[in-house]
């Protein structure tokens, strides 16, 4: 009997899990990929999983990437679900990116500047030709540790000396935390930046792009992009001074944007800010564009475009939320669908019996059917 | 479960959720924002309901989990296993045996008692969301009881279709004050919420909202005097147990338009069949 088909959920789930494990491993004649391999050779995947998973741990992120078969949103989800169970024993001090051990630093607004332009490990000037050499083990060249590059001033700081750049906030207030407190509006900039840093790279990329094409333009210049290691410090209350607990690699983007000034503020440059775990320049730049776009109201600009709509951006930037709700449509909806079926059948019955309802100005299904009937 | 607290969430998180629940019970139908956690199940799978259940679950509770009215749908199985694993509580499929029932999309046919709690999984807690996408705006509308937009929507339904065309997630007014989404239960189930002896809790994980209906609270489905609320049900008896008053699933049995209508509440159907009721397509219990 057909009805039997919906039974047996328990067994079906077990079988699905077993099949998934088999699929994940793939052909056992091929060596299994190690976490160290993922970390060192698929580093950009690890970076993205850490950023959107909101957890800086390369080994766990490599594990998540492996467990998710390379599906990076799934990997970020695994990290998030783990992160939420971790106890919080301290908050770090704000990281000081001006003290970054630079691996890459470029500015699009000054030809040369203190510290110079450092290209670093970029794809920017590669020709995107498939390198068939890589089909074989390349063997590789040993990594040479170069001299550590001295700390460099940040471009907005250079501009600020002349008073051309808006000042930083005081940074004294306790920052909000979206993972503890639900989003509320108006959302302060710290909360917005947290949401963007956790947000989906693709979503931010599209929104940032939209501002460039006229939907909330911000006249951006890439003032500076830097990537490298920053020190993470905590200040245990029993010590009373800060201690270094480790380093992490981050990418920072500071967009320099025009601002015509207002009655209270002289004309000056404003900033959009992006900061992302690992080497994720695309996301840091998109984040900076969207951050600046969301400041439209604060700066007295007209709010017309999606990227300027804080509520729209923040409620839709999280890909764990988005993928959950989009994909939940595959869960059973028999009950609601049945009620829709009955509803539609009833409406069609009544439609057949009754004279055609008023067509009005031709709106709606009823009107369309009326026209067909005539 | 090793390495995890009873019922997965740590006690501080449970406490935060219970505080939200207390506020929700004190203001029936009002959506209380809460610090929803990321759960090991995806958003949309019932993370809100799971967090509420985890926060009120005790060691002596007996848990029932249903999805679409059934205990054996995959997601119900998965959530029941989650609590069996993380809390080690007794589980049941019998509505009358359960002290705590987590549900998606249905209210059991068996009337609930005052010593039971029902937890609804809610995808979209904001009943006005399809009419006004901004939560800043809908919060203002709730504060002012400004529900004209919803009444206009219902009126437009009547004007265009001759009737209110909402068949599930049918909006209700709770305690004569707050407009509330009953979660996507069929409108058929709405009357069960009215003056229910059991405590009704609603959890929306992705949207980070909790709301509640205390026992014996008035819950009215919105309607008009000349277009009264009409619950919808397929006009058939259950094919297996013959029930004429239960909500039915429609099962496609062949490609020639054949349909079997069966109780969506599997416990209700099994119970009736055990008591000797047989539907037109059913088999007497003794035969199994």
Image (tube, coloured by chain):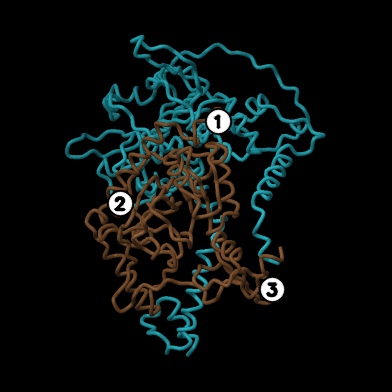
Chain B on-screen colour = brown
Residue farthest toward the right in the current orientation of the protein: A29
The dot on residue B30 is 2
Q: Which residue is mark 3?
A: B255
- In the rendered structure, the answer to whether residue A9 lies left or right of residue B245 reads right
Using the image, name the chain to which the residue with label 1 belongs: A
User: The N terminus of chain A is located in which quarter?
Assistant: bottom right
Query: What is the chain letter for disc 2?
Result: B
Mark 2 falls on what kind of element?
A: loop
- Do residues under tags 3 and 1 come within 8 Å of each other at their CB atoms? no
* SS at circle 1: helix
Circle 1 Cα neighbour tier, 10 Å, few/some/many (<14 / 14–19 / ≥20): many
Distance in Å between CA atoms under marks 2 and 1: 41 Å
Q: Earlier in the sequence, mark 2 or mark 3?
A: 2
Q: Is residue B127 left or right of residue B121?
A: left
Q: Nearer the viewer, mark 3 or mark 1?
A: 3
Q: Residue at x 46, y 79 (%)?
A: A347
Q: Is residue A106 above or below residue B29?
A: above
Tell me the residue that label 1 is attached to: A47
Name the residue at 55% across, 49% down: B92
Q: Residues within 10 Å of mark 2 (few under 14, many from 20)?
A: many
């Amino acid at each position: 009997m057909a009805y039997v088909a919906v039974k047996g959920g328990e067994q079906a789930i077990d079988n699905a899990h077993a099949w998934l494990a088999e699929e994940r491993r793939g052909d056992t004649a091929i060596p299994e990929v190690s976490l160290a391999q993922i970390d060192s050779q698929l580093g950009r995947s690890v970076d993205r999983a850490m950023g959107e998973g909101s957890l800086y741990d390369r080994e766990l992120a490599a594990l998540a990437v492996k467990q998710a078969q390379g599906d990076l949103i799934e990997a970020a989800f695994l990290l998030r679900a783990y992160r939420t169970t971790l106890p919080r024993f301290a908050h770090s001090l704000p990281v000081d990116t001006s003290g970054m051990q630079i691996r890459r630093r470029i500015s699009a607004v000054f030809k040369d500047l203190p510290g110079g332009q450092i290209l670093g490990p970029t794809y920017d000037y590669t020709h995107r030709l498939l390198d068939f050499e890589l089909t074989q083990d390349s063997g590789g060249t040993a990594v040479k540790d170069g001299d550590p590059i001295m700390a460099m001033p940040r471009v907005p700081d250079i501009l600020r000396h002349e008073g051309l750049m808006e000042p930083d906030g005081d940074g004294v207030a306790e920052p909000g935390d979206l993972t503890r407190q639900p989003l509320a509006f108006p959302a302060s900039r710290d909360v917005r930046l947290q949401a963007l840093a956790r947000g989906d790279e693709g979503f931010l990329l599209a929104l940032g792009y939209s501002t460039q094409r006229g939907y909330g333009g911000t006249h951006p210049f890439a003032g500076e992009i830097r990537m490298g290691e920053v020190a993470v410090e905590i200040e245990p209350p029993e010590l009373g001074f800060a201690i270094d607990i480790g380093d992490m690699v981050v990418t920072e983007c500071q967009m320099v944007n025009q601002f015509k000034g207002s009655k209270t503020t002289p004309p000056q440059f404003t900033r959009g800010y992006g900061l992302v775990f690992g080497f994720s320049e695309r996301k840091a730049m998109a984040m900076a564009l969207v951050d600046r776009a969301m400041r439209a109201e604060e700066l007295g600009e007209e709010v017309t475009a999606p990227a300027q709509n804080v509520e729209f951006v923040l409620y839709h930037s999280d890909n764990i939320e988005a993928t959950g709700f989009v994909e939940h449509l595959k869960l059973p909806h028999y009950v609601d669908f049945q009620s829709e079926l009955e509803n539609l059948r009833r409406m069609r019955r009544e439609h057949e019996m009754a004279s055609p309802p008023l067509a009005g100005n031709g709106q709606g299904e009823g009107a369309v059917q009326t026209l067909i009937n005539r | 479960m090793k390495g995890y607290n009873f019922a997965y969430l740590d006690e501080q998180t449970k406490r935060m959720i219970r505080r939200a629940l207390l506020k929700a019970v004190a203001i029936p139908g009002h959506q209380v924002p809460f610090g929803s956690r990321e759960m090991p199940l995806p958003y949309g799978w019932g993370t809100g309901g799971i967090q509420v259940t985890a926060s009120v679950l005790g060691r002596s509770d007996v848990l029932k989990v249903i999805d679409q009215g059934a205990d054996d749908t995959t997601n119900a199985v998965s959530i029941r296993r989650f609590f069996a694993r993380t809390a080690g509580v007794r589980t049941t499929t019998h509505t009358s045996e359960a002290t705590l029932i987590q549900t998606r999309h249905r209210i059991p046919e068996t009337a609930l008692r005052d010593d039971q709690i029902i937890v609804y999984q809610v995808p979209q807690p904001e009943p006005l969301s399809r009419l006004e996408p901004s939560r800043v705006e809908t919060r203002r509308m709730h504060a002012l009881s400004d529900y004209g937009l919803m009444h206009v929507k219902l009126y437009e339904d009547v004007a265009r279709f001759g009737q209110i065309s909402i068949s599930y997630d049918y909006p209700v007014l709770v305690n004569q004050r707050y407009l509330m989404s009953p979660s996507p239960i069929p409108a058929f189930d709405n009357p069960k919420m009215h003056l229910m002896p059991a405590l009704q809790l609603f959890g929306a994980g992705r949207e980070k909202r909790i709301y509640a209906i205390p026992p014996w609270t008035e819950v009215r489905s919105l309607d008009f005097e000349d277009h009264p609320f009409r619950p919808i049900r397929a006009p058939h008896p259950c094919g297996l147990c013959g029930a004429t008053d239960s909500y039915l699933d429609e099962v496609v049995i062949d490609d020639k338009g054949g349909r079997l209508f069966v109780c969506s509440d599997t416990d209700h159907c099994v119970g009736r069949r055990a008591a000797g009721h047989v539907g037109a397509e059913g088999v007497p219990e003794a035969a199994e």
